Image: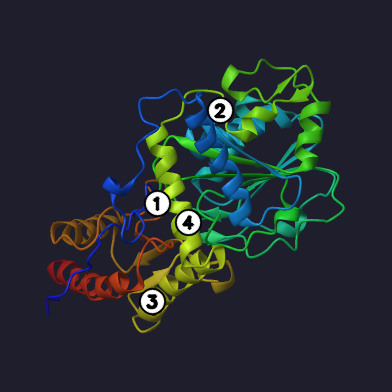
Amino acid sequence: MKPSIKPANPNFSSGPCSKRPGYDLAALDTSSLGRSHRAAIGKDLLGKACSWTAEILGLPEGYRVGVVPASDTGAVEMALWSLLGPRKVQLFAWESFGEGWVTDVVKQLKLDNVETIKADYGQLPDLSRADPAADVVFTWNGTTSGVKTPNGDWIADDREGLTICDATSAVFAMDMPWEKLDVVTYSWQKVLGGEGAHGMLILSPRAVERLESYSPPWPLPKIFRMTKGGKLIEGIFKGETINTPSMLCVVDYLDALNWVQEIGGVAATMARSEANLAVLEDFVASRDWIHFLAADKAVRSNTSVCMTLDLDADQVKKVVKLLEAEGVAYDINAYRDAPAGLRIWCGATVSSEDLQKLMPWIEWAYGQVKGAG
């Protein structure tokens, strides 16, 4: 039977992700629009984006937060091009974005002392191979595979190298062991449902020490430069951005942070994501034609949840198109490099009620396509 009840919000994209519940564009404070981001009003708002982030996330003393260009990708690139070189580099990759950092380090930076440790989609590589003497680059959550790092136990407390973590679909949704992480990047448009184009760069004191003691032998574009005269440009981490940001995006991000604080902080956003994943787990457990790409629950993402169906790739596309045509789920097809299937965002801005309403529609669409096949 075709379901009759539709999700109130059909936006289940894995980026940009759904806006927070109750979001109202008209409610944003737009007094900074049309003003210079270097004026007091702009610097204050950008500074708040940095300081409020550190406060809500509970970052350790001495950790710095900066707003940087080009989304999470720009933040990761800044770290790779500015910090890598003096030590062996280990790259852990198990999906598209992790593979992208492998390409950067091996083919663009062309570093010699590099070890790449990979796993197929749905799997996690052997993290126990992490070398405490090496700089380690990895994603916390594989957005295109639905496989996350279960914890930070594999990272040595007395490590000599730096840990560089792309955590764009993890921050605000997963428990991050900050003391184990020297560089963390994310973007506003993931867990908080913010706007694109801006990235967040979090540096530990150890990362700052590397920046101030090491100068890479290759040229650095202006938007990558975080030091001047061998010292960190502290202004970057106080709201003095390297390039011109969108102040509309900034106030949108502050609105999202305010929502996080209002609902109970990071513990509440993590709980919302876990509750959303539970809806999908209950559904998959009682059906034999749909499967999690991450079979191991311990490494299964609670944000970008990836599933395969007992259908071929063309049939899966038909399921996705049916759901979109009915207005019940937008943009839930698997990432282009991943195995054919569904990818449903379960971050904190999505409601469990909407996911519960979506499940019968997925079953209906599957039956329609399977029956026609």
The residue carrying mark 3 is 279
Left/right placement of residue 241 relative to residue 362 reads: right
**Residue topped by disc 2:** 241
Compared with 134, 122 (above or below) is below
Q: Are marks 2 and 3 in contact (CB under 8 Å)?
A: no
User: What amino acid type is highlighted by mark number 3?
Assistant: Val
The mark lying in front, picked from 2 and 3, is 2
Between 250 and 16, the one nearer to me in the picture: 250
Q: Position of residue 247 (x, y in %)?
A: 41, 33
Q: Are marks 3 and 4 in contact (CB under 8 Å)?
A: no
Q: Which of labels 1 and 4 is toward the front?
A: 1
* Comes first in the chain, label 3 or label 1: 1
Residue under circle 1? 193
Q: Which mark is residue 335?
A: none
Q: Residue drawn at (55%, 71%), measured in percent from left and top?
A: 296
| SS for dot 4 | loop
User: What secondary structure is found at the residue carrying circle 2?
Assistant: loop
Instruction: State which mark lies toward you, 2 or 1.
Output: 2
Marker disc for residue 145: 4
Residue 319, position as x, y percentages in the image = 22, 62
Q: Earlier in the sequence, mark 3 or mark 4?
A: 4
Label 3 vs label 4, nearer the camera: 3
